[in-house]
Structure formats: structure tokens, C-alpha cells
């Protein structure tokens, strides 16, 4: 159930039943020439909605639509917010949910840039330390890597992400058939991070299909349900 469509009294009644609330955390980020800027929002919103359909007493909060970006920061359409802002939003949301009686929050990030992940983690840790509330924080990107499709060279806006969006919103996927690589810089700190993604995406796009995307999405949903059951010690 989506919190944004509830009334005040619906929410209060749900909060009284000790729910789990999933906050999808998206982004507005360039995803190559073929995927929408909302790609990192569409994926966790879909996953959160499916988890809430399959797992009792689980609600979906309105998504956060902005993230911290580095390598794609200067690409057309990427809107970035700062580390401190991300950390503050994470902290503020967990605290606000806790004040509303929600004691089990899941933050699900579609964008998995290292700075963004660190900022959310810091905000969550501070809130947990101060209140004792329970928080799970994870990225569906990392779980999609565990699925192991599309090869080790797949990356940003690559075969996995293209397949996943083909499965959820095929109307938003442009046609593209040229695979793209990336510049491996290992330990070097780049002044312009976008030089590691010369085409703005990375992977064998030609192998992307809606069927593959549907099975990756389903794997992510089931994996997250297992993580929630384990970490929040629910009876399976
Ligand atoms: Zn993405």
C-alpha cells in the first residue's frame, strides 16, 4: 500500500499495526541515450511496490527523487544534491517515521554511487543510534549484481538496467544496439569522472530483454523479502 494515497486516518490505523515502511530512494540521472532520467527511481519504486504486495503489513513511502552523483554529474539531465543533504534527508526521514510510530524502516536506493550510499548510511546510523529504531538500508543495484546476468563488464545504464526498465516501462526505452565499454581507472582520482563512461553507459545493450529484466526484478523482490524477514526477525 502506498502511503501517499492514504488519508491521515488510514495512515494512523496502519501505523498502529506496527508496519514495515519502505522508502524508495531514486535519482534524476543521465542513463545513456536510451533510458529515462527516472531510471533509478522507477526500479526501486517497482521493487518496493512488489515487496509490499507480497509481504504483509508493509507500506511504501513516497520516493526521494534526487541523489548525489559524481561521474554523471555534468551529463545532461543529471540533478545532484550534496552529501550533507542526502545524509540529512536519510536521518530526517527515519526520525520522522519513528515519530509517527513506524519502528521498522527499509531504505531502498536505486542509485548506488559510493558517495550517495555512504551519505545515506551515515544518516541512518545516526538515527538508529539516537532512537533505537530498526532500519535496513540496501540498494537494488547491488542485489541485481548478485543475479549475475550480462557479464562482469556490465554497468551504468547497461544490459541489466535496460532489461529491468524494459520489463517495467518499455514505453520509456529508446532503441539502441551499440554496446559500450568504460575506461578502467582503478585507483586514479579523475577530475572529470564522466571520462570513465565515454558513451554515458556501459555494457552489452544488445543482450537486454524484457524477459531478463522481469526475472532480475523478481529475484530482487524475493531477495529483499528474505532480507527483511531475516533482519527484522519475522516469522517466515
Ligand atoms: Zn541507474
Image: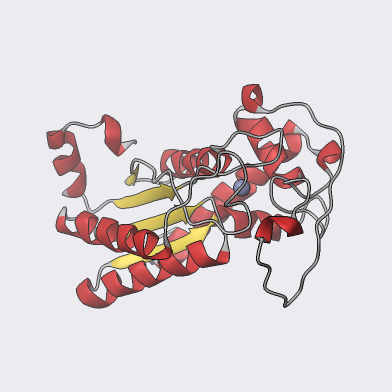
In the rendered image, residue 129, in percent from the top left (x then y), is placed at: 27, 77
Q: Is residue 91 left or right of residue 147?
A: left
Q: Quadrant of the C terminus?
A: bottom left
> Can residue 187 be seen in the rendering of this structure?
yes
Task: Look at 80% across and 66% down and name the residue there.
Answer: 184
Q: In the drawing, does residue 33 fall left or right of residue 91?
A: right
| Residue 106 drawn at (x, y percent) | 39, 57
Viewer-side residue, 155 vs 165: 155
Residue under the point 22% across and 61% down: 95
Query: How many dots with numbers?
Result: 0
Viewport quadrant of the N terminus = top left
In-front residue for pair 47/71: 71
Front-most of 166 and 215?
A: 166
Q: Position of residue 182 (x, y in %)?
A: 80, 57
Q: Is residue 78 left or right of residue 219?
A: left
Q: Residue furthest top?
A: 171
The picture quadrant where one finds residue 162 is top right
**Residue visible at 82% across and 57% down in the picture:** 153
Residue 234 appears in the figure:
no
Which of the 4 image quadrants contains residue 114?
bottom right
Picture layout, residue 62 above or below residue 192: above
Horizontal and vertical percent for residue 71? 63, 57
What residue do we see at 39% from left, 43% from top? 63
User: Relative to 173, is 154 above or below?
Assistant: below
- Considering every residue shown, the one lying at the far front of the view is 191
Q: Can you tell which quarter of the image residue 69 is in?
A: bottom right
Vertical order, 180 against 126 (above or below):
above
Q: Looking at the image, what colour scheme do you see? A: secondary structure
Position of residue 179 relative to residue 127, above or below, is above
Amino acid at each position: 500500500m502506498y502511503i501517499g494515497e492514504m488519508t491521515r486516518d488510514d495512515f494512523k490505523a496502519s501505523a498502529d499495526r506496527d508496519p514495515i515502511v519502505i522508502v524508495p530512494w531514486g535519482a534524476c540521472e543521465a542513463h545513456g541515450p536510451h533510458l529515462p532520467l527516472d531510471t533509478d527511481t522507477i526500479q526501486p519504486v517497482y521493487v518496493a511496490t512488489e515487496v509490499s504486495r507480497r509481504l504483509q503489513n508493509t507500506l511504501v513511502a513516497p520516493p526521494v527523487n534526487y541523489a548525489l552523483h559524481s561521474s554523471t554529474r555534468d551529463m545532461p539531465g543529471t540533478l545532484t544534491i550534496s552529501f550533507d543533504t542526502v545524509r540529512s534527508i536519510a536521518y530526517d526521514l527515519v526520525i520522522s517515521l519513528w515519530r509517527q510510530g513506524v519502528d521498522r524502516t527499509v531504505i531502498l536506493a536505486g542509485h548506488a554511487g559510493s558517495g550517495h550510499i555512504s551519505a545515506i548510511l551515515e544518516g541512518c546510523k545516526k538515527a538508529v543510534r539516537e532512537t533505537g529504531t530498526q532500519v535496513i538500508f540496501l540498494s537494488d543495484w547491488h542485489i541485481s549484481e548478485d543475479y549475475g546476468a550480462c557479464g562482469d563488464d556490465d554497468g551504468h545504464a547497461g544490459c541489466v538496467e535496460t532489461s529491468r526498465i524494459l520489463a517495467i516501462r518499455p514505453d520509456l526505452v529508446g532503441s539502441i544496439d551499440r554496446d559500450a565499454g568504460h575506461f578502467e581507472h582503478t585507483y586514479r582520482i579523475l577530475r572529470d569522472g564522466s571520462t570513465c563512461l565515454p558513451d554515458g553507459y556501459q555494457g552489452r545493450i544488445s543482450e537486454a530483454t524484457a524477459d531478463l529484466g522481469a526475472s532480475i526484478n523478481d529475484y530482487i523482490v524475493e531477495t529483499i523479502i528474505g532480507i527483511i524477514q531475516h533482519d527484522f526477525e519475522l516469522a517466515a
